[in-house]
Image (tube, helix red, strand yellow):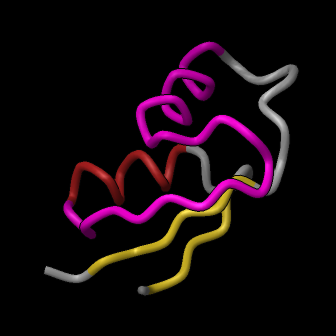
Amino acid sequence: MAKIKVKKVKSAINRTKRQKLTLAALGLKKIGQVVEHDATPNILGMVKKVEHLVSVEEA
């Protein structure tokens, strides 16, 4: 399975509760933090919902 690296690049301040919970579900807490996930449809859907707050690259 393909892997992706997700990096939080913007703050979640003044964002909806849903977006904050999505970031938490991805395991992102601090700006600059990088997490690695399998590129499943569930994870890709979560990343798409907060794509303005994160950067994504293939691992």
Q: Quadrant of the N terminus?
A: bottom left
Which percent across, then down, holds residue 44?
A: 35, 59
Q: How many marks?
A: 0
- Snapshot quadrant of residue 2: bottom left
| Residue 44 belongs to the span the image colors magenta | no
Which percent across, then down, holds residue 48?
A: 49, 55
Q: Quadrant of the C terminus?
A: bottom left
Q: Is residue 49 above or below residue 47?
A: above
50 horizontally vs 44: left or right: right
Q: Residue furthest top?
A: 17
The residue shown at (68%, 18%) is: 16
32 horizontally vs 45: left or right: right
20 horizontally vs 45: left or right: right
| Residue 26 belongs to the span the image colors magenta | yes
Q: Is residue 14 above or below residue 8?
A: above
- Snapshot quadrant of residue 58: bottom left
Which percent across, then down, holds residue 8?
A: 70, 53
The residue shown at (57%, 72%) is: 56
Front in this rendered view, residue 22 or 33: 33
Front in this rendered view, residue 30 or 1: 30
Q: Residue furthest left?
A: 1
Q: Is residue 59 above or below residue 46?
A: below
The residue shown at (35%, 51%) is: 45
- Tell me the magenta residue range: 17-40
44 horizontally vs 6: left or right: left
- Snapshot quadrant of residue 14: top right
Q: Is residue 15 above or below residue 45?
A: above
Front in this rendered view, residue 47 or 30: 30
